């Protein structure tokens, strides 16, 4: 007898439907698995047969053929265990139901028949809704993740027997539901607050501008000046994720397997801190079967690279295109994958090899030049703010005075972002000033004659590139938004220029 079960698999960050066809026939006992299965899928034959037996079912005698369609796409992972088991039960007439066409089924089977969690449940649930299915059968640990997709019945099944009994109508399982408002309200407070940082008011101002416009920032200063401390508090002043941003970020984390058991959504902006020994595959993604890397895991969040010159130059150079386009395309023999990577790059570094400022360093000029030369000019051009982080003065460290709280700063950042959302409401792909293109720059960054002359002088004196010119305009637009100003003035341009001059002073 032939049976069909609907399932799905993930390709990149999107899911595609997979039809599990099972035919139980006559002949010698043999299980044939077709449809380009990888090793994990091939091993499902033994897991499924043992799980069926331990769940009180009989594994059919004779020739059992299992086909995973479409047959020309490689299938990966253990998520096909449950649909294969249900298909075998239906083909051997141990399961009688007309509900198999209404549900997408995913889940890994334990030898006992229990159902274990799987990766990529959110994109699979979205695909199930798009294909018009009534619902989806998922492991209990993944139920909350799938339940964020509205208009879909999410049935959490604890084991194989319960799944079969539900499809036959013998038992009822309450669909999983989540309260999105409550999920977003949870854990929005941050334990790290800018009020804890002594001094460094100019650096806090620069980070506020970076957060308000989604700009990349480089912190340059000796060890112990608080570069990492400041960077780790930056997520606390970023605007909250929207539902669409949370769904897209959660899909990436679900595919990689970073969601905690029972976690429904990623509701806080990611903060990724890869070590400086990371490879290009670890940073951009890759391997034999392309998977998201750190820049995609930081999507809609922050990628913090501490000790920037210690990263391999070849690794840093691969980030240039993703920084511009907000996505990374990885080509391998297994196929080509495109992953989103709209992130804020926050980097920190010492000004010299021994960590001291250039005038105090014992390193030779050539050693300093070689150290700073590990970061290319084109990469620096893509970093909007270059900020000097000076040592904290003793009276600031020992004083009782505290700075503004993250909540106060965040309120201004959110107000500035709201102005940008209104400005770009007809262009949803532009989420902040840092994402403006040439057309938007021309429209929203108009300068009067005196302000243009000021910018011209800065470009000439500092020998800045055309890309730096665009970055200054975007930065000035953000500074104006923080001041609730309609037009960019000379004051805004002057502040933006000072964040581009530091790198030229040091690099020359």
Image (cartoon, helix red, strand yellow):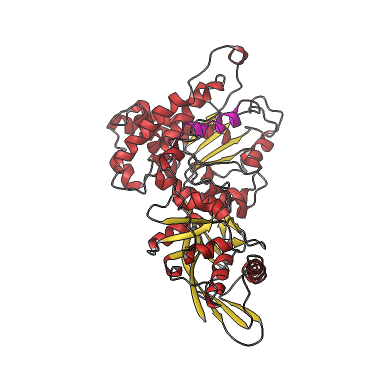
Q: Could you tell me residue 352's position as x and y percent?
A: 65, 33
Left or right placement of residue 66 versus residue 485 in this view: right
Question: Which segment did they paint magenta?
Answer: 224-241
Q: Could you tell me residue 322's position as x and y percent?
A: 49, 51
Q: Could you tell me residue 274's position as x and y percent?
A: 62, 44
- How many tags in the picture? 0
Of residues 106 and 96, the one drawn nearer to the viewer in this rendering: 96
Of residues 483 and 141, the one drawn nearer to the viewer in this rendering: 141
Does the rendering let one see residue 156? yes
Which residue is farthest bottom? 27
Of residues 154 and 302, the one drawn nearer to the viewer in this rendering: 154
Q: Is residue 239 magenta?
A: yes
Residue 443 versus residue 193 in the image, above or below = below
Q: Residue at x 63, y 75 (%)?
A: 59
Q: Which residue is drawn at 35% across and 47% down?
A: 438
Residue 156 versus residue 468 in the image, above or below = below
Q: Is residue 61 magenta?
A: no
Does the rendering let one see residue 328? no
Would you identify the image quadrant in which residue 63 lies? bottom right
The C terminus sits in image quarter = top right
Q: Could you tell me residue 132's position as x and y percent?
A: 37, 64
């Amino acid at each position: 007898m032939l049976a069909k079960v609907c399932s799905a698999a993930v390709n990149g960050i999107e899911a595609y439907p997979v039809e599990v066809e099972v035919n139980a026939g006559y002949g010698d006992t043999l299980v044939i698995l077709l449809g380009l299965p990888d090793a994990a899928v091939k091993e499902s034959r033994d897991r499924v047969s043992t799980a069926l037996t331990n769940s009180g079912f009989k594994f059919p005698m004779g020739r059992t053929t299992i086909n995973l369609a479409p047959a020309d796409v490689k299938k990966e992972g253990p998520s096909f265990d449950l649909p294969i088991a249900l298909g075998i039960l239906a083909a051997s007439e141990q399961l009688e139901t007309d509900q198999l066409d209404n549900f997408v089924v995913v889940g890994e089977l334990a030898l006992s028949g229990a159902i274990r969690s799987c990766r990529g449940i959110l994109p699979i649930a979205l695909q199930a809704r798009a294909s018009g299915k009534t619902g989806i059968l998922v492991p209990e640990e993944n139920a909350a993740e799938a339940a964020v997709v509205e208009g879909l019945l999410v049935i959490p099944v604890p084991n194989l027997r319960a799944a079969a009994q539900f499809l036959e109508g013998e038992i009822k399982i309450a669909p999983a539901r989540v309260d999105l408002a409550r999920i977003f309200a949870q854990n929005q407070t941050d334990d790290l607050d800018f009020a804890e940082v002594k001094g460094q008011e100019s650096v806090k101002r620069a980070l506020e501008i970076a957060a308000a416009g989604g700009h990349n920032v480089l912190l340059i200063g000796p060890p112990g000046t608080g570069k990492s401390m400041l960077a780790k508090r930056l997520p606390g002043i970023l605007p909250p994720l929207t539902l669409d941003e949370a769904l897209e970020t959660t899909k990436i984390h679900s595919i990689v397997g970073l969601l905690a058991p029972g976690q429904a959504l990623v509701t806080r902006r990611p903060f990724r801190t890869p070590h400086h020994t990371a490879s290009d595959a670890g940073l951009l993604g890759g391997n034999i079967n392309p998977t998201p890397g750190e820049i995609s895991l930081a999507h809609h969040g922050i990628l913090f690279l501490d000790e920037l010159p210690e990263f391999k130059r070849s690794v840093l150079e691969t980030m240039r295109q993703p920084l511009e386009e907000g996505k990374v395309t990885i080509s391998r023999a297994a196929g080509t994958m495109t992953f989103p990577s709209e992130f804020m790059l926050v980097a920190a570094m010492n000004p010299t090899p021994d960590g001291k400022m250039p005038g105090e360093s014992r390193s030779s000029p050539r050693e300093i030049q070689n150290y700073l030369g590990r970061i290319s000019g084109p990469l620096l051009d893509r970093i909007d703010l270059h900020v000097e982080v000076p040592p904290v003065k003793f009276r600031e460290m020992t004083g009782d005075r505290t700075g503004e709280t993250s909540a106060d700063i965040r309120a201004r950042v959110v107000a500035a972002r709201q102005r940008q959302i209104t400005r770009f409401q007809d262009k949803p792909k532009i989420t902040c000033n840092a994402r403006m293109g040439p057309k938007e720059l021309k429209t929203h960054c108009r300068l009067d004659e005196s302000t243009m002359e000021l910018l011209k002088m800065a470009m000439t004196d500092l020998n800045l590139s055309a890309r730096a010119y665009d970055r200054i305009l975007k930065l000035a637009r953000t500074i104006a938004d923080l001041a609730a100003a309609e037009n960019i003035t000379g004051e805004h341009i002057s502040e933006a220029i000072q964040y581009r001059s530091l790198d030229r002073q040091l690099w020359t």
